[in-house]
Image (cartoon, rainbow, N blue to C red):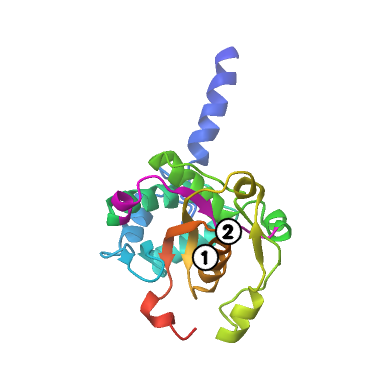
Amino acid sequence: MGWMQHVQPLARLVIAARCPLCDRPASKILCIDCDRQLQRDRLSNPLHRESVPIVAWGQYGGTLRQAIAAMKYNHQPELARLLGIQLAQTWERSPLARRYPNPVVLPVPMHPQKQAERGFNQAELIAKSFCQYTRLSLQASGVQRTRNTEPLFNLSPTAREAMLDNAFCLGSDFQRRPPKLVLLVDDIYTTGATLRAIHHLLRQHHIALCGLAVSARAIAPSQHHNE
């Protein structure tokens, strides 16, 4: 019976190795089919040079959208590791990584109430995986969210900006030791309102923002100028 006590837990681990998107057996985080479909959402040109450059791994849609939704709403935080590694590889190939080799990585903060409800901040989990791969410094408490805002995508441009007015403050990490250069990390780039709000806060404290790295870009940055 002694050897069975060791075999049974191993058997359970093998059985538990299922794809979080389709529930089929998977030797890695995703099964072969879902991973193949995910790669179709990858952007051929991940860098967009705006006032703050944006590096995005993929276009928000298809399997990438399904993966992000599963991570956030079906409690599949292990997907953040995959998204973080993919984003790190994209970042390291971008010209921004050569121009800015040692930024401090800041995940977009989540309001404490919302984070308690979800159990994690997906941007922070992606950033942790990103930093493990790139060996960049992570400061998850650099900026704090002080207002529990509603989703922005249904709001007008004016309402978005008003919703995020004074929604962030400098956190303990940056108060104690402000970095010279920051790279912001998030799961999705949508309206750009969050990016602008955090960029404004950092500028007030003389902290430079070299870019935003995201797993998915919902719209091309050139489409949001009037948002």
Q: CA distance from mark 2 to mark 1?
A: 10 Å
**Residue 211 in picture, x, y percent from top left:** 41, 60
**Residue 102 in picture, x, y percent from top left:** 40, 45
In the picture shown, does residue 159 fall above or below 118?
below
Q: Residues within 10 Å of mark 2 (few under 14, many from 20)?
A: few
Q: Is residue 179 left or right of residue 103?
A: right
Residue 47: image quadrant is bottom left
- Viewer-proximal residue among 204 and 141: 204
Q: Disc 2 vs disc 1: Cβ atoms closer than 8 Å? A: no
Q: What residue is shown with label 2?
A: 205
Query: What's the mark number on residue 199?
Result: 1
**Residue 164 in picture, x, y percent from top left:** 63, 73
- Viewer-proximal residue among 109 and 205: 205
Residue stretch rendered in magenta on the structure: 96-111
User: Which amino acid does the dot numbered 2 rest on?
Assistant: His
User: Which amino acid does the dot numbered 1 rest on?
Assistant: His
* Tag in front: 2 or 1: 2
- Viewer-proximal residue among 90 and 71: 90
- Viewer-proximal residue among 68 and 169: 169
